[in-house]
Image (cartoon, helix red, strand yellow):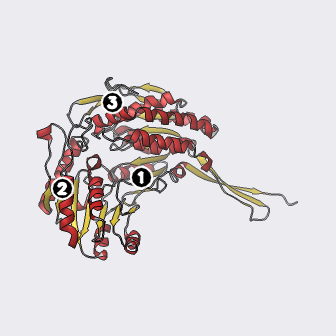
Amino acid sequence: MADLTVPIRPRMLINGELVGASDEKTFEVYNPATREVSAHVPEASEADTNAAVAAAKAAFPSWSALDPTQRAAPMKKLAALLRQNNAKLAHLEAISMGHPVAKYPYGFTGASFFETYAESWHRIQGQSSVTTPNQVHMTLRQPYGVVAVILPWNNPVHFFCSKSAPALISGNTVVLKSSEKGPLAVAFLAKLVIEAGFPPGVFNIISGHGLPSGKILSRHMDIRVLTFTGSSRTGKLIQEEAARTNLKKVILELGGKSPAIIFNDANLDKAVDQTQHSIQANSGQICMANSRIYVQRDIAPQFIAKFKEKFANVKIGNPTAKETDHGPQADEIQYRTIMSFIEEGKKSGKLELGGVGKLDDLGGYFIEPTVFTETPEDAKIMKEEVFGPVVNINVFDTEAEVIKKANDSEYGLYAAVYTRDISRAMRMVKALESGYVAINCTSPLTGRDLPFGGWKGSGQGREGILYSMENFLEVKSVLIQLEDS
């Protein structure tokens, strides 16, 4: 297990070597709880980014030609290292983007991705047909080549594992870029990749901002697939750059404005507990957090009172403390953006709880859990993703009314419905314009064997244990003409 007290010296992994930026440029990462510098991180230059892609391209022929059990070997070793270093990863995420170390699971859950995909190579299957006389038809599933992975800052270890593991076992090589807001755990993982024994060039890891490295990856002619999780704005820019260049395949999991709908026959205490957890987890910095809650009118007063009581009872503090369950926002930009939304919300709705930034009191980017009610559906805070511990609770009377309200959004990532009426539940499932619909539960809960992805402006493509490998395998049709006997 890594020593948490050792000074942090992040490096990038290019062609099997841990390196700084070629021009020696770095950027500072601050602890959002204290605003102290946590580390100086390499800023990948154009030359660094191109070198990482060139290394991945050179490594692709030999890596893709390996027996898949040989590709699986370093993946299994990396899984073991992830489990051993969960505490270190938790600490690094706490001091870079504010995730509390309490109950931090991502070393363990991330390991499960590498373990599962390491044993999934047998699912790389084509099809065959002999229905046409004197012909044999078949399809092959083959890796694309170099895959670019651009991570979000809010959960970097999870997405590091869930995106790179299926790409690697499928025979692709990877260039992965961390977010400038949350690069420290990923930089530590670069060391573990070497220790796990991946051949040079197979798995490259760079750090930096969207400009220049993110844009270069989006435009690079030698990258054939790019997978990104993050904001809708950035996703659109990536898609535009890919379209202007080589039309690389792009998988996007983007923002959300997820509704939770509470009918009057719901288990009220369960609905309160779970919807509160959804918007409070990771200080509201989760794309599928239920930031809009619609409650049937006759139970709304009771629901709101219980929700406020529970939401107000969080333990705000330094995310490295084990008793903390509500850390700071990731950085000053996020803090200022959320506080701006809160000020807008005070003008359009009724503030029921919170609405206060704690920067002056606590010295970090903390925001109190905040609840608004009676907010018009066309208000900015109802339409745009806040990405903080801010929820709007509105009332409804009928199914038709709440379906219209829930669907009146450019987002469609996750929706939740609480009701004991199975027929009503299935009507809602069919009517809601969302890639994910949960009944009597809500985010961040997902099904391990279900696809995840959004409708409308929340993205394109699907990811998941049974689906992600498909993103990294190209289809080739083969026709064989037989001679007459």
Between the C-alphas of marks 2 and 1, the distance is: 37 Å
User: Upstream in the sequence, badge 3 or badge 1?
Assistant: 3
- Pointer 1: residues within 10 angstroms few (<14), some, or many (20+)? many
Identify residue for label 3: 41
Identify residue for label 1: 252
User: Upstream in the sequence, badge 2 or badge 1?
Assistant: 1
Residue at image position (21%, 58%) is 307
Between the C-alphas of marks 2 and 3, the distance is: 41 Å
Residue 472 in the image: above or below residue 266: above
Residue 68's disc number: none
- Pointer 2: residues within 10 angstroms few (<14), some, or many (20+)? few
Q: Residue 470's x, y, as percent?
A: 54, 52
Q: Residue 431's x, y, as percent?
A: 38, 71
Residue 202 in the image: above or below residue 468: above
Q: Residue 243's x, y, as percent?
A: 45, 52
Identify residue for label 2: 309
Residue 259 in the image: above or below residue 172: below
Q: Which residue type carries mark 3?
A: Val
In the displayed structure image, the side of residue 478 where residue 457 appears, left or right: left
Q: Which residue type carries mark 2?
A: Glu
Q: Quadrant of residue 432?
A: bottom left
| Local SS, label 2 | helix
In the displayed structure image, the side of residue 338 where residue 250 appears, left or right: right
Given contact means CB atoms under 8 Å apart, are the residues at marks 2 and 3 in contact?
no
Given contact means CB atoms under 8 Å apart, are the residues at marks 2 and 1 in contact?
no
Q: Quadrant of residue 406?
A: bottom left
